[in-house]
Amino acid sequence: MTYHIRDAISDDAPALADTVIEPIITVFRGRVPDQCLSWLTKAESITSWQKWFQADRNDGQFLLVAELTEGFVAGCALGGPQPDDPQFHGELYLLGVLSTHQRQGIGRHLVKAAAERLLQRGLQSMRVRILSINPNRSFYERLGGQYVGERPYDWNGVLLTEAIYDWPDISRLLTT
């Protein structure tokens, strides 16, 4: 399979909705109450992505996509500054890969591309937060993420926990 990582553009909004919604539903259906998943409509997601593209991007956020063939986006990564902990400067806010394209290196390459982008912006460390019940947590561990703890997370009125993984030196991600 051939793909390339590029910056997302506003025309990608429908594909971005798919690369976020489909994996979330596939992974979490049966693991969380339905009310957590009920807000996930493609129309609302497209609107949210369109607003993201229209916003002033002086906040340092970036959005990358993995494109397989012209116009077919199989994954995305949203990253930028991490304001909560002065020890960790960057954050991978979101990583999504269509379930039909997982375990093919797309997620790993998106994480590496996000790390490169953060390094280009002078951010040397990175954090990611994922639901503790996510069965794909080991993905971040295989990439060298250090589990540092958990914190509460409210998902549509359901109290869950997030697991936090840190990379003190994201330049190491570029060699994995």
Image (cartoon, rainbow, N blue to C red):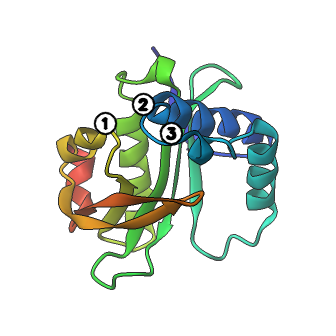
Quick one: label 3, few (<14), some, or many (20+) residues within 10 Å?
A: many
Quick one: label 2, few (<14), some, or many (20+) residues within 10 Å?
A: many
Q: Amino acid at mark 3?
A: Gly
Please report whichever mark, 2 or 1, sits nearer to the chain's N-terminal start: 2
> What residue sits 66% from the left and 32% below the top?
18
> What residue sits 40% from the left and 36% below the top?
107
Q: Is residue 89 visible?
A: yes
Instruction: Pinpoint residue 135: horizontal percent, then vertical percent.
Output: 31, 36
Q: Residue furthest top?
A: 1
Using residue 80 as the reference point, say whether residue 34 is left or right of it: right
Please report whichever mark, 1 or 3, sits nearer to the chain's N-terminal start: 3
- What label does residue 106 carry, if any? 2
Instruction: Pinpoint residue 80: horizontal percent, then vertical percent.
Output: 50, 66
> What residue sits 23% from the left and 62% below the top?
167
Q: Amino acid at mark 1?
A: Pro
Quick one: label 1, few (<14), some, or many (20+) residues within 10 Å?
A: few
Q: Amino acid at mark 2?
A: Ile
Please report whichever mark, 3 or 2, sits nearer to the chain's N-terminal start: 3
Contact between marks 3 and 2 (CB within 8 A): the answer is no
Instruction: Pinpoint residue 160: horizontal percent, then vertical percent.
Output: 40, 57
The mark closer to the camera, 2 or 1, is: 1
Contact between marks 2 and 1 (CB within 8 A): the answer is no
Instruction: Pinpoint residue 17: horizontal percent, then vertical percent.
Output: 69, 39
- What label does residue 68 carry, if any? none
Disc 1: which residue: 135
Judged from the image, the secondary structure of the residue bearing numbered disc 1 is loop
Disc 3: which residue: 96
**5 or 36: nearer the eye?**
36
